[in-house]
Image: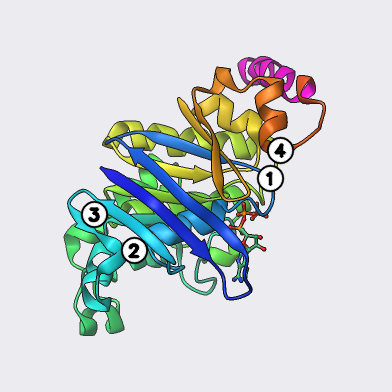
Amino acid sequence: MLRLDALTKTYKTGDKALKAVTLDVPPGQVIALIGPSGAGKSTLIRCINRLVEPTSGSVMLETTNLTTLRPAALRRERRRMGMIFQEYALVERLTVMENVLSGRLGYVGFWRALTRRFPQKDVDEAFRLLDRVGLLHMADKRADQLSGGQRQRVGICRALIQDPALLLVDEPTASLDPKTSRQIMRLICELCAERGLAAIINIHDVALAQRFVARVIGLRFGEIVYDGPPDGLTPEKLTEIYGEEDWEATIEKVDEDDAVEAAE
Ligand SMILES: Nc1ncnc2c1ncn2[C@@H]1O[C@H](COP(=O)(O)OP(=O)(O)OP(=O)(O)O)[C@@H](O)[C@H]1O
């Protein structure tokens, strides 16, 4: 459903953030993107919806080449790509419900958006989504009254109400504690499975990636150096991706997490 072909990004500073990355994402597949700081993970995610303009190569979303679209057509295609951010990107002074409905701004007309009069079906869907993520009782609360985990749930609802074909998720748990991180990763993966939604999740926590997804992509210096199942991430592979470190500890941590999870 998504194909990146020789996708390259060289920033004006000369940084080669992506070097001819080629990647196929089948419908409904959830991918974790791992790699050290500066490997190009955020750049890859942002080149897909062109928040960052690729230097060369192509991004095909189903039959549409996103890299050649003009602004109006790009705006339409962006509706099909929900984005979830590390810092949630909520409007603090708006309510939870208003933040979720803002995911529909790409669909409703200008005047409706200005007066925030959304169609009833959008409001109904927002209630359904909030119920699904356990935040129905918070619908009227202002975003600035929520915890980090609750904010991210609102961010997830806002992305899903777009009715996307693909989720682009940039460090969804980087600002959260370990238990909340696990809950958020599980929620994202469950929702993708329920909706048959494909996702690319940029996540720096290897143990979390290994725990929740079936396919992991390892990036290093803008190139894919691993593409496979989580249990193929041996200490040697992780060293290849990240450089020297004691990976036995990370891999064991997954087992420990299982025990913690079972106890919770
Ligand atoms: N706006 C920019 N201008 C110039 N160089 C940039 C810009 N954004 C990123 N880079 C460079 O591109 C490379 C990849 O950065 P990117 O943020 O994509 O990596 P990352 O894997 O997401 O890292 P992190 O995990 O630290 O967020 C780095 O060398 C970075 O310095």
The residue that appears at 65% across and 49% down in the rendered structure is 174
Q: Which residue is mark 4?
A: 242
Is 264 drawn above or below residue 137 in the view shown? above
* Mark toward the start of the polypeptide (1 vs 3): 1
- Whichever of callouts 3 and 2 sits on the residue coming sooner in the sequence is 2
Mark closest to the chain's N terminus, 4 or 3: 3
Q: Residue 170 in the image: x percent, y percent? A: 53, 52
The CA distance from mark 1 to mark 3 is 41 Å
Res 206 quadrant in image: top right
- Check residue 252 for magenta coloring: yes
Disc 2 marks a residue whose amino acid type is Gly
Along the polypeptide, which appears first: circle 2 or circle 1?
A: 1
Q: Estimate the spatial distance between the alpha carbons at disc 4 and disc 3, rounded to whole Å.
A: 45 Å
Task: Provide the residue designation for mark 1.
Answer: 36
The one nearer the camera, 103 or 169, is 169
Q: Residues within 10 Å of mark 1 (few under 14, many from 20)?
A: some
Q: Which residues are magenta?
A: 249-263
Find disc 2 in the rendering and name its residue: 103
Q: Which mark is residue 176?
A: none
